[in-house]
């Protein structure tokens, strides 16, 4: 069988615990006929920063570039000033590796409780994906402060939207919509206020949409989208949106689809010139780190996305089915991180 070179970044807080379970499931899923998975661990995050002052050294980034795929736990720690690890590790990875598609599925599995009255607001279920732009928007760090700390302080954080960047993510979203049964794509933005970026996004959806005549398109302002996510989530199939709006609505999406403990994501470079990176949507949860309390399911579902990215759709489906079976039986039972990983792995 072929070999897959997998970089593993456990990161901070519960990251290493949930990643251990993800790897356990990956091993079970690829045992036998699967590829040989050759894992290399990279120590990035708070511990490294405290010890060396480093965030993402060039040498590590260049090693990561040579890997086939990356599994990440979580980055962020309250002992490090806000932004240092986010701007020093996570965002540089997404930017340097050109992860322009931040793919975040929201699927309510049978037996999983949603805070919504699902029978009423989504009788046909919740099953949509958010294609969040991953390399532009207000995340690029194009800002500054003037007269810091004075009553006349001015802070800017300029959202950067390029035709190139918008077009490639919009085209990817159309392709994903076309491959789904409903073939429906919603652009979420705020073009009534953000008239520059909003109009670029809207025009791009219109123009790229010419190539996908069978995909139906819709538009929602981001504020209205939050209403519909809570009251009529069944209307969504594929959503495409910018980096910051996507960050916000994917937390709502996770909440309505069973909670952040189940939300998986992929930071994908569809051109495959660099390794894509799969990570749970949740953060490092320092309050429960090291206690075996974290739910590794989001990481396991991220592993399923990783397998699909590697072209191993059958293995991905088997992992997802094992998770679905575990969720259906889970009830209110409280299990440790490792017990959940074991239970899912044992179904494979
Ligand atoms: C996420 C996180 C990150 C983001 C933070 C930690 C930089 O919230 O992956 O959603 O804003 O993208
Ligand atoms: Mn987020």
Image (tube, helix red, strand yellow):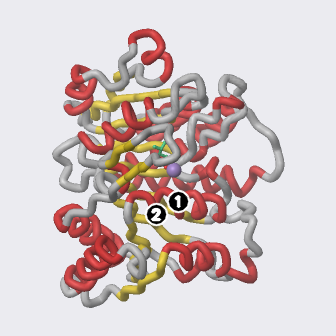
Asked if residue 319 shows in the view, the reply is: no
Ligand 2 closer than 8 Å to label 1 CB: yes
- Residue at left 39%, top 68%? 241
- Residue at left 58%, top 64%? 253
Q: Position of residue 267 (x, y in %)?
A: 36, 49
Q: Position of residue 258 (x, y in %)?
A: 67, 59
Q: Which mark is residue 158?
A: none
Q: Which residue is mark 2?
A: 245
Q: Position of residue 286 (x, y in %)?
A: 64, 30
Q: Nearer the viewer, residue 223 or 94?
A: 223
Q: Within 10 angstroms of label 2, few (less than 14), some, or many (20 or more) residues?
A: some
Tell me the SS state at disc 2.
helix
Q: Which residue is mark 1?
A: 248
**Position above or below: 11 against 105:** above
Q: Position of residue 169 (x, y in %)?
A: 27, 65
Q: Quadrant of residue 185?
A: bottom left
Q: Quadrant of the N terminus?
A: top left
Q: Quadrant of residue 89?
A: top left
Q: Nearer the viewer, residue 85 or 321?
A: 85
Q: Within 10 angstroms of label 1, few (less than 14), some, or many (20 or more) residues?
A: few
* Residue 9 in the figure: left or right of residue 36: right
Q: Nearer the viewer, residue 88 or 313?
A: 88
- Residue at left 30%, top 55%? 136
């Amino acid at each position: 069988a072929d070999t897959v070179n997998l970089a593993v970044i456990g990161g901070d807080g519960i990251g290493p615990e949930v990643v251990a379970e993800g790897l356990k499931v990956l091993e079970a899923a690829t045992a036998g006929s699967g590829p040989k998975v050759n894992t290399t661990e990279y120590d990035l995050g708070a511990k490294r920063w405290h010890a060396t002052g480093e965030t993402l050294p060039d040498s590590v980034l260049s090693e990561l570039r040579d890997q086939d795929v990356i599994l990440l736990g979580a980055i962020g720690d309250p002992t490090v000033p806000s932004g240092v690890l986010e701007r020093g590790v996570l965002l540089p990875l997404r930017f340097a590796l050109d992860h322009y598609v931040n793919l975040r599925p929201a699927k309510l599995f049978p037996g999983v409780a949603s805070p919504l009255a699902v029978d009423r607001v989504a009788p046909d279920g919740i099953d949509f994906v958010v294609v969040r732009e991953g390399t532009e928007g207000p995340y690029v760090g194009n800002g500054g402060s003037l007269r810091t700390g004075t009553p006349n302080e001015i802070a800017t954080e300029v959202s950067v939207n390029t035709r190139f960047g918008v077009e490639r993510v919009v085209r990817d979203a159309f392709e994903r919509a076309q491959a789904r049964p409903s073939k429906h794509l919603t652009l979420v933005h705020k073009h009534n206020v953000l008239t520059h970026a909003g109009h670029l996004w809207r025009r791009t959806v219109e123009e790229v949409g010419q190539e996908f005549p069978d995909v139906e398109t819709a538009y929602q302002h981001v504020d209205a989208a939050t209403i519909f996510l809570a009251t009529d989530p069944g209307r969504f199939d594929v959503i495409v949106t910018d980096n910051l709006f996507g960050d916000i609505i994917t937390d709502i999406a996770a909440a309505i689809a069973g909670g952040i403990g189940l939300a998986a994501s992929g930071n994908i470079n569809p051109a495959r010139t660099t390794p894509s990176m799969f990570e749970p949507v949740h953060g490092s949860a320092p309050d429960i780190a090291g206690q075996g309390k974290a739910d590794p399911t989001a990481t396991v579902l991220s592993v399923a996305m990783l397998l699909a990215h590697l072209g191993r759709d059958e293995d991905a489906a088997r992992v997802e089915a094992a998770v679905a079976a575990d969720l259906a039986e889970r009830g209110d039972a409280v299990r440790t991180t490792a017990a959940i990983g074991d239970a899912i792995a044992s179904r494979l």
